Image (cartoon, helix red, strand yellow):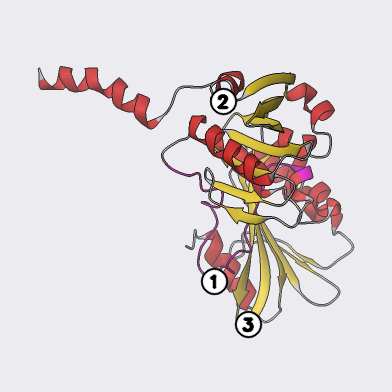
Amino acid sequence: MKKIIFLLILPLIAGCLFPAAVSMRTVANSVSDYTVTVERECDATGIGDIIPDLASIYVEFACDSCMVAEFKGNGETFNVEMVSFSKSKGAMGAYLSSDIPDSQPVSLGYAGRKSDKAIEFYKGKYLVLIQPLSGSSIDGAQELARRIERLVPGETIKPDVYEVLPTTQRVKDSEFYFAGPKSFSLGFSSELANELQLGGAVEGDAAEYLVDGDTVIFVMVRYVGRSQTLSAVNSYINSHKNQPVIMPGESLPYYTVIDADRSENYIAENGDWLYLLMNGPSGGKAQQFFEYLLRGGR
């Protein structure tokens, strides 16, 4: 009997831990003391018409819909952009891949920022940007942001987009998250994105690491299946065929590509994942560190 009672209660507990989906219109229309006029709505295919500068990046992070609305209240008017993503990890990735010039952190949702022209935050699967119109104040925009934030459902645990990155010797605040070539090119060259065939990637992380006083860059990319991972490794090697390349062997299950400045790059596959360490100084320390990472070093 106790087991049956527990099974009956379990859905109620799950409902508290994982809030039901709430539409953007529902959130907007639930903000008290404001008159809301929805101006535009679209799914992922139409986001380029609404947010052209960031559309390609938002699509990589799996946005599924967007809404633009005008909020009027307390004698002020605001433009509000709300973007929904399929996962909260996508909303976080989109937030980290964009910025507001001259902004400062503000306590809203999982993370927020504020300038004298706009305020933005993300929570759960939503990314929200608010801009004052017609001489309205940024303080008024912040008050509206707080009201919207309270209505946006959010998981109880903030997503960790860097969870797969090793922590040993990692340089603080050097972490970088991407979901395809557009977001990858915010931190790396488009040439490297092509070499790694990032059009077929699911997601990836990168960070700087200290190896015996030198800074190296470690990149992890996840693909759909091992065949795509192998194809990406081969693409990278073929792109560097004019450079010295040490082929894998029984004791070295990875490629080593040597640059003109004698620095070394190591690349390997592990199922769905590709591992790449760049700018490694010669002498063996970087090679040993890469082997440590391949063993799942944390």
- Residue highlighted by disc 3: 213
Disc 1 is placed on an element classified as: loop
Can residue 93 be seen in this snapshot?
no
Q: Please tell me the numbered disc located at residue 33.
A: 2
- Residue highlighted by disc 1: 169
For the magenta stretch, what is the residue range? 157-182
Within-10-Å neighbours for mark 1: few <14, some 14–19, many 20+ = some
Relative to 247, does residue 39 appear above or below in the rendering?
Answer: above
In this view, the residue in front, 165 or 56, is 56
Image quadrant assignment for residue 71: top right
- Residue under the image location 86 percent in, 74 percent down: 260
Tell whether position 13 is magenta.
no
In the figure, is residue 186 to the left or right of 119? right
In the figure, is residue 180 to the left or right of 275? right
Kindly report the distance in space between the C-alpha atoms of the residues bearing marks 3 and 1: 10 Å
In this view, the residue in front, 214 or 39, is 39
Tell whether position 176 is magenta.
yes
